[in-house]
Amino acid sequence: MTSESYPSCSLDARRQAKAGLGNTYLPDQAVIREVIRENHLVNTYHLSLVDELAGHRFSYEPGQFMMISMPHLGEAPISFSSNPDAGDGFSLTIRNSGSLTGAVHKPQVGDIIGVRGPYGNPFPMDRFAGQNLIIVAGGIGLAPLRPIIEQALSQPDKFGEITLCYGSRTADDFCFTRDFDRWRQGIDLRLTVDQGTPQWDGPVGLVTELLGDLTMDKRDMALVCGPGIMIRFVIGLLKERGIPADRIFTTLERRMKCGVGICGHCHSGGRLICVDGPVFTAAEMPEPDNP
Ligand SMILES: Cc1cc2nc3c(=O)[nH]c(=O)nc-3n(C[C@H](O)[C@H](O)[C@H](O)COP(=O)(O)OP(=O)(O)OC[C@H]3O[C@@H](n4cnc5c(N)ncnc54)[C@H](O)[C@@H]3O)c2cc1C
């Protein structure tokens, strides 16, 4: 969809509304600069805001998300998957899992999608300084953790040892495989798959098994993201291995409408995931998710 045919409203109208009425719900236009196919269900889109001034001012932090939209199909929250320090727009890694995310898989380079944000509490990167990071991800759950890996690799003196334990259903379902060789230069990258194939010569089993031989240290902090059931098991295991709940971080997914704490759609255990999260420590996680 081109910027001419994107029917939300004119840029001037959006600017006036934002300036005069503070209408949070009006999306900005973002142009697709690059599309990278991660696997048969997931693409990464590199985007930049059409409004150049807004683009220059735009900044975000690891763990935050954007509400993306397509005309007549509504909105969906999607985490940033790029390094905020790269400063040339931003990337969103999107799994085709329904009506909107399926439609977002159709546009090509040069087409426009709607975006508003950034929203949500980020990962507290300052707290991670000087600490070892144990990053545990399942499937597309690596997307919101990738900005942390990139920031840590670009400032190696700021962080201790970094271990990434990453599991996916099969070897064809991994995301960001193009990054693996570069990441291996600075981090201990451990991969596993649920189902082996003749082409796969690595471990077969749950991501929790990759944690088995890790020696825990009091400087360890853990970051976990993936399917809900995986998050519960991994957090339970990390606690058993002696990592305190306030040193384990995760990012939670709930169905969201507004993204800014007004509609209450993402309410869970007394918290609004969009504004109180989506990043929580295992000590702060709302009751329904807390193992
Ligand atoms: C903070 C946050 C960050 C997210 N980051 C990403 C990301 O980086 N990449 C990505 O691909 N997805 C991400 N998601 C999930 C994504 O928002 C949903 O997949 C999307 O809203 C589905 O919209 P749809 O219209 O395509 O699907 P629909 O047609 O509305 O639904 C399709 C299916 O997806 C389920 N679903 C819809 N929304 C959610 C949700 N929020 N959580 C869990 N299941 C849902 C529905 O129950 C249904 O089974 C994130 C969600 C949150 C809350």
Image: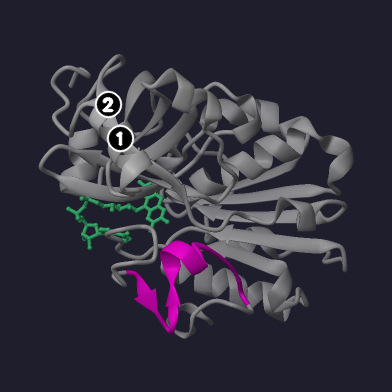
The picture places residue 46, in percent across and down from the top left corner, at 43, 25
* Residue at 21% across, 26% down: 10
Q: Which mark is residue 16?
A: 1
The one nearer the camera, 155 or 179, is 155
* Residue at 60% across, 33% down: 83
The picture places residue 232, in percent across and down from the top left corner, at 51, 74
Gap in angstroms between the C-alphas marked 1 and 2: 6 Å
Left or right: where 172 falls relative to 105: right
**Circle 2 SS class:** helix
Left or right: where 230 falls relative to 254: right
| Magenta span includes 269 | yes
* Residue at 24% across, 42% down: 101
Callout 1 touching callout 2 (CB < 8 Å): yes
Pointer 1 local density, CA inside 10 Å: few below 14, some 14–19, many at least 20? few
Q: Residue furthest front?
A: 20
Q: Residue furthest top?
A: 110
**Circle 1 SS class:** helix
213 relative to 66, above or below? below
| Magenta span includes 274 | yes
Q: Which residues are magenta?
A: 266-282
The one nearer the camera, 92 or 84, is 84
Q: Circle 2 is placed at which residue position?
A: 12
Question: In what quadrant of the picture does the N terminus appear?
Answer: top left
Q: Is residue 191 visible?
A: yes
The picture places residue 291, in percent across and down from the top left corner, at 53, 82
Quarter holding ligand 1: bottom left
Residue 227, quarter of picture: bottom left
The disc labelled 1 sits on which kind of residue?
A: Gln
* Residue at 62% across, 25% down: 86
The one nearer the camera, 140 or 263, is 263
Callout count: 2
> Cβ(mark 2) to ligand 1 < 8 Å?
no
